[in-house]
Image (cartoon, helix red, strand yellow):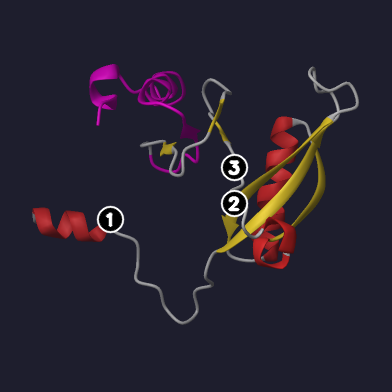
């Protein structure tokens, strides 16, 4: 395979008529066991999803992983009070170190078939060594 073919084969496909465009969504969470606020803290985050069911999946998965409650979620365009506000992005959770990080594109696992996402290259290398038994020298990209 030529170098040009390798590069173009990894690019995302061109959008077709069947593709659903991504919409910006807002979600409001409540952390009932907040250390700073005795009654529980409330916060709003934004994220992108193609439709209601994908947004629902993202919202509930995040709530389960972080052990928080969902108060509501809606498309940002239907939330008049929040249209002109810059709301923080929904954080990701590093598969290896369990820390929250806020990158638009987290580092995916380079091992085929693994859906893990990482906050740093070091966490990815540690995951590869532990989970997939890949030696350090071959883990470098």
Mark 3 to mark 2: distance in Å?
9 Å
Per the rendering, the mark at residue 10 is 1
Q: Secondary structure at mark 1?
A: loop
Tell which residue pokes out farthest to the bottom in this image. 17
Residue for badge 2: 47
Earlier-in-chain disc, 3 versus 2:
2
| Range covered by the magenta-colored residues | 112-141
Kindly indicate the quadrant of the structure image that contains residue 64: top right
Residue for badge 3: 88
Cβ atoms under marks 1 and 3 closer than 8 Å? no
Q: Nearer the viewer, residue 45 or 101?
A: 45
Q: Nearer the viewer, residue 132 or 127?
A: 127
Kindly indicate the quadrant of the structure image that contains residue 65: top right
Answer left or right for 10 relative to 23.
Answer: left
Q: Which residue is depicted at the point 28% across and 55% down?
A: 10
Earlier-in-chain disc, 1 versus 3:
1
> Any magenta on residue 140?
yes
């Amino acid at each position: 395979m030529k170098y040009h073919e390798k590069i173009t084969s990894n690019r995302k496909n061109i959008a077709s008529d069947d593709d659903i465009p991504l919409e910006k969504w807002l979600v409001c969470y409540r952390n009932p066991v907040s250390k700073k606020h005795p009654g529980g803290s409330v916060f709003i985050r934004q994220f992108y999803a193609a439709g209601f069911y994908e947004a629902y999946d993202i919202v509930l998965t995040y709530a389960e992983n972080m052990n928080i409650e969902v108060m509501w979620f809606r498309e940002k365009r239907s939330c008049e009070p929040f249209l002109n506000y810059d709301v923080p992005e929904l954080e990701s959770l590093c598969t290896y170190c369990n820390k929250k990080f806020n990158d638009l594109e987290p580092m995916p696992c380079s091992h085929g078939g693994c859906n893990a996402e990482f906050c740093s290259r070091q966490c990815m290398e540690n995951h590869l060594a532990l989970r997939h038994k890949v030696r350090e020298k071959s883990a470098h990209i």
